[in-house]
Amino acid sequence: MFRSQALPAVCKHAALRYRRDNDATQVTMTVIYHMADRAAWLAAVSVDAYFGTAQDQVDGFIHFSTASQVEESAAKHRKGVKNLVLIAIDAEVLGSALRWETARGAQLFPHHYGSLTPSMVRAVYDLPLGDDGKHVFPPLR
């Protein structure tokens, strides 16, 4: 946290959120999420590069979702898929290769036009299926 008299400029792609709390301005990173096949992610770690899913490669970008979007994305696009991991990354790490684009329901979704290296990733979570066939998510922020 840092102190400032004025709020800093808003990031071009909403990658940073600013919150006024008393006299201090707190900067929090927007964490975005990508679902990947566990084996594909482990292979990517071994070569230090991840190029996304087969669908990502067809579309030309890696699909990400925000915390409020990812469960619906899983239900729509990954229903019943086993052996997934959830990759969490701070949006600002992706720089100008990240674009917020309109998709499902006129929502803005983060799309990364590039590859990822494991060092960019904040956390990787197992994404098991529950008894109801839906993915069980860790607490997200």
Image (cartoon, rainbow, N blue to C red):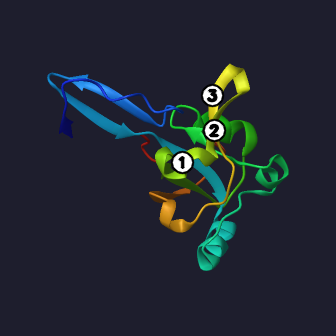
Categorize mark 2 by other alpha carbons within 10 Å: few (<14), some (14-19), many (20+).
Answer: many
| Quadrant (top left/top right/bottom left/bottom right) for the N terminus | top left
Residue 134 against residue 9 in the figure, above or below: below
**Residue farthest to the right?**
58
User: Which callout, 3 or 1, points to the residue nearer the camera?
Assistant: 1
Earlier along the polypeptide chain: callout 3 or callout 2? 2
Q: Which mark is residue 99?
A: 2
Residue 141 against residue 53 in the figure, above or below: above
Residue 135 seen in the figure: no
Q: Which mark is residue 118?
A: none
Residue 77 appears in which quarter of the rendering? Answer: top right
Residue lying at 48% horizontally and 37% vertically, measured from the top left: 15
Residue lying at 32% horizontally and 29% vertically, measured from the top left: 8
- Report how many numbered discs are placed on residues in the image: 3
Q: Which mark is residue 95?
A: 1
Of 125 and 33, the residue lying toward us: 33
Name which residue type carries label 2.
Arg
| Quadrant (top left/top right/bottom left/bottom right) for the C terminus | top left
Name the element at disc 3.
strand
Residue 75: x and y, percent? 68, 38
Residue 91: x and y, percent? 50, 45
